[in-house]
């Protein structure tokens, strides 16, 4: 059998340490292709570049830099760069966690979603950060054992795994569901030197709904959180209710 072909990307950019650790961690499992954005793309969600040319640069064997989003990277890698479909896509290791509703903003998770749309097994992995230096070591090691399992078992259809690794040495692993933030909703308003206002989103601390089964709770307890996500966003619980609305033409 051919060695496994593994494609990795991230949203922190090609030079990010988390990407390098992910590459090193997966190297023993097959041939790793690195196709990553040329700069930080955090918060770009599932953006796909449609109205401007995409530049691609090969910087080393199986290493490419894309002037685009994480989703562009997966799209180009699968459709142009790789000669055969990868057996696995891994996205990360992101600098900072991707939990709860935040995942809709996440370029890291969206890259894994893009692979899932192409029916390629995929996971996203993010590292909690805090005070002091960041270590990606535990996340790297755990990525390798997860990748090994996925290559052996495959992935249920339409599914990706969103993995978050706590800042301190993980005490275990919990399969979780997506939590929900309670947003403070604040926007910081400042003035530029010409007196015009500008605005800054993010940075305020947000709380989350208390539920021990969530990704947030697992991290708070020092556990690795693994949330299976799927592409179908339909809220089946309310389909019947909406059917009862008066929406006839
Ligand atoms: Mn990021």
Image (cartoon, rainbow, N blue to C red):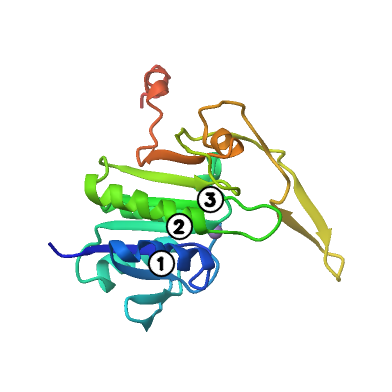
Figure quadrant of residue 245: top left
Residue to which mark 1 is pinned: 24
Neighbours of disc 3 within 10 Å: few (<14), some (14-19), many (20+): some
Q: Quadrant of the N terminus?
A: bottom left
Residue to which mark 3 is pinned: 105
- Give the CA distance from mark 2 to mark 3: 23 Å
* Near-viewer residue (104 or 148): 148
Are the two marked residues, 1 and 2, in contact with CB atoms closer than 8 angstroms?
yes
Residue 187: x, y in percent? 75, 48
| Helix, strand or loop for disc 2 | helix
Q: Quadrant of the C terminus?
A: top left
Neighbours of disc 1 within 10 Å: few (<14), some (14-19), many (20+): some
Of labels 1 and 3, earlier in sequence is 1
Residue to which mark 2 is pinned: 140
Q: Which mark is residue 102?
A: none
| Helix, strand or loop for disc 3 | loop
């Amino acid at each position: 059998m051919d060695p496994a072909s593994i494609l990795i990307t991230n949203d922190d950019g090609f030079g990010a340490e988390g990407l390098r650790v992910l590459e090193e961690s997966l190297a023993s499992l097959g041939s790793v292709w690195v196709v990553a954005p040329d700069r930080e793309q955090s918060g770009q969600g599932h953006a796909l570049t449609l109205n401007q040319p995409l530049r691609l640069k090969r910087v080393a064997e199986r290493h490419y830099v894309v002037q685009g989003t994480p989703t562009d990277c997966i799209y180009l890698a699968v459709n142009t760069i790789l000669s055969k479909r990868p057996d696995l896509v891994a996205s990360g290791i992101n600098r900072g966690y991707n939990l709860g509703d935040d995942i809709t903003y996440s370029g890291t998770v969206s890259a894994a979603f893009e692979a899932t749309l192409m029916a390629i097994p995929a996971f996203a992995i993010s590292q909690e950060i805090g005070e002091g230096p960041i270590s990606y070591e535990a996340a790297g090691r755990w990525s390798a054992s997860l990748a090994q399992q996925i290559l052996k078992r495959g992935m249920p259809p339409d599914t990706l795994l969103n993995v978050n690794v706590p800042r301190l040495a993980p005490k275990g692993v919990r399969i979780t569901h997506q939590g929900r933030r309670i947003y403070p909703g604040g926007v910081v308003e400042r003035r530029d030197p010409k007196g015009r206002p500008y605005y800054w989103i993010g940075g305020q601390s947000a709380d989350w709904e208390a539920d021990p089964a969530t990704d947030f709770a697992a991290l708070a307890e020092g556990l690795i959180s693994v949330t299976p996500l799927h592409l179908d966003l339909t809220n089946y619980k309310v389909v019947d209710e909406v059917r009862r609305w008066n929406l006839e033409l």
